[in-house]
Image (cartoon, rainbow, N blue to C red):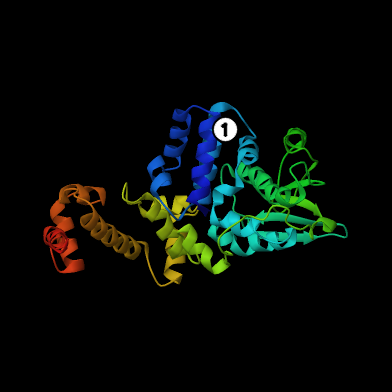
């Protein structure tokens, strides 16, 4: 999973690289639109971001689009998360903060650290998650990790080497030119090599804030909760698409890069099912739309996947004990 904050910034970067209609086409391929990114909070799937980058890369013939996007990525776009990480007293603490808080930007991923006699190799592991376009995310991650190091070590700092899971000789040569450092392939995860002697470098530019941000504060500041379960992942993905559409079980599974049966088994193991989650979300969205908008009931029914308004009215009465019209009337009376 990836935080919508990051994906929205990636789309802004793509808009600066290519015509907007190219980006629009890529968003549609991933089952997303700009409204979801501008108004939504929470997460979308890792696969969706990969599909967007791969679609644009194919349309413009850029095999290393992810690296170019990563180079242009503004780490401060993460907002409170960036303030938390870059506000650390030294580089070692910043890496630890990033590792502990990663669930707020990339649920399901983790920061992995490998130490040698002279270096610490820092990478982002997505637990073997492989989807079309994952190469772009791997290459972009190297720049994001490097930007944390450069905050402490200076803008001219370069790692002694980078690591990537795959890539041929031609790729390594081109990426070395893009990255400004040697590239090694065959690694478990995209990683950056930092010298052990650099880890205790003090923060030369601590970010100023009215109070110290704690890990406990971060979720509320970013408007998200870490995804801890498959049910949570399904909820986040479906909420990102509401109220534009209600995703089918197969589309939710596709966003998670798994098959529908695998999704069913995973939800069953957690004591729930797609149908239960879908019903809960539709009720939640119906209440909100009736309370906060003047959209006609028939239109709300259609937006929430009901072919017949009377089916929606019947379901709403079962949820609340009143009709949509009465529910909205009570809101107006209270106002």
Please give the name of the residue rendered at 35% of the width and 52% of the height, measured from the top-left corner. Answer: 248
Please give the name of the residue rendered at 74% of the width and 61% of the height, measured from the top-left corner. Answer: 92
Does any portion of residue 218 appear in the rendered image?
yes
Image coordinates for residue 143, horizontal then vertical, percent: 68, 44
320 displayed left or right of 34: left
For the residue pair 153 and 1, the one nearer the viewer reads as 153
In the image, residue 229 sits, relative to residue 140, either above or below, namely below
Image coordinates for residue 91, horizontal then vertical, percent: 73, 58
In the image, residue 178 sits, relative to residue 76, either above or below, namely above
Image coordinates for residue 24, horizontal then vertical, percent: 43, 34
132 displayed left or right of 220: right
Residue 215: quadrant of the picture: bottom right
127 displayed left or right of 292: right
Image coordinates for residue 230, horizontal then vertical, percent: 47, 63
Q: How many marks?
A: 1
Q: Residue furthest front?
A: 210
Residue 64: quadrant of the picture: top right
Secondary structure of the residue carrying tag 1 is helix
For the residue pair 283 and 88, the one nearer the viewer reads as 88
Q: Residue furthest bottom?
A: 271
For the residue pair 253 and 143, the one nearer the viewer reads as 143
Q: Dot 1: few (<14), some (14–19), or many (≥20) neighbours within 10 Å?
A: some
In the image, residue 158 sits, relative to residue 267, either above or below, namely above
Report the quarter where the C terminus lies: bottom left
Does any portion of residue 225 appear in the rendered image?
no
330 displayed left or right of 239: left
Please give the name of the residue rendered at 44% of the width and 63% of the height, measured from the top-left corner. Answer: 232
Residue at numbered disc 1: 57
């Amino acid at each position: 999973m990836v935080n919508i904050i990051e994906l929205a910034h990636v789309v802004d970067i793509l808009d600066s690289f290519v015509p907007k209609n190219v980006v629009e086409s890529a968003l549609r391929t991933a089952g997303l639109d700009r409204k979801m990114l501008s108004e939504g909070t929470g997460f979308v799937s890792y696969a969706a971001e990969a599909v967007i980058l791969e679609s644009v890369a194919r349309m413009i013939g850029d095999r290393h689009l992810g690296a170019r996007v990563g180079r242009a990525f503004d780490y401060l776009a993460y907002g409170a998360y960036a303030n938390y990480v870059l506000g650390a007293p030294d580089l070692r603490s910043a890496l630890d903060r990033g590792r502990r808080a990663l669930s707020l930007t990339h649920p399901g991923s983790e920061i992995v650290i490998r130490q040698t006699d002279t270096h610490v190799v820092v990478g982002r592991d997505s637990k073997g998650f492989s989807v079309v376009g994952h190469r772009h995310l791997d290459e972009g991650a190297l720049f994001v990790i490097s930007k944390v190091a450069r905050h402490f070590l200076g803008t001219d700092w370069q790692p002694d080497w980078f690591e990537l899971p795959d890539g041929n000789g031609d790729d390594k040569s081109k990426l070395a030119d893009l990255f400004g450092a040697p590239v090694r392939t065959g690694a478990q995860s995209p990683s950056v090599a930092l010298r052990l002697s650099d880890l205790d470098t003090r923060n030369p530019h601590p970010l100023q804030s009215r109070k110290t941000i704690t890990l406990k504060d971060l979720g509320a500041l970013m408007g998200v909760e870490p995804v801890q379960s498959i049910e949570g992942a399904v909820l986040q993905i479906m909420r990102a698409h509401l109220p534009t559409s209600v995703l089918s079980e197969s589309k939710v599974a596709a966003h998670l890069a798994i098959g529908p049966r695998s999704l069913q088994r995973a939800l069953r193991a957690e004591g729930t099912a797609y149908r239960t989650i879908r019903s809960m979300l539709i009720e939640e969205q119906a209440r909100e739309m009736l309370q906060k908008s003047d959209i006609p009931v028939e239109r709300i029914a259609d937006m929430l996947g009901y072919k017949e308004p009377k089916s929606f009215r019947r379901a709403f009465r079962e949820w609340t004990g009143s009709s949509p019209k009465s529910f909205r009337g009570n809101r107006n009376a209270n106002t």
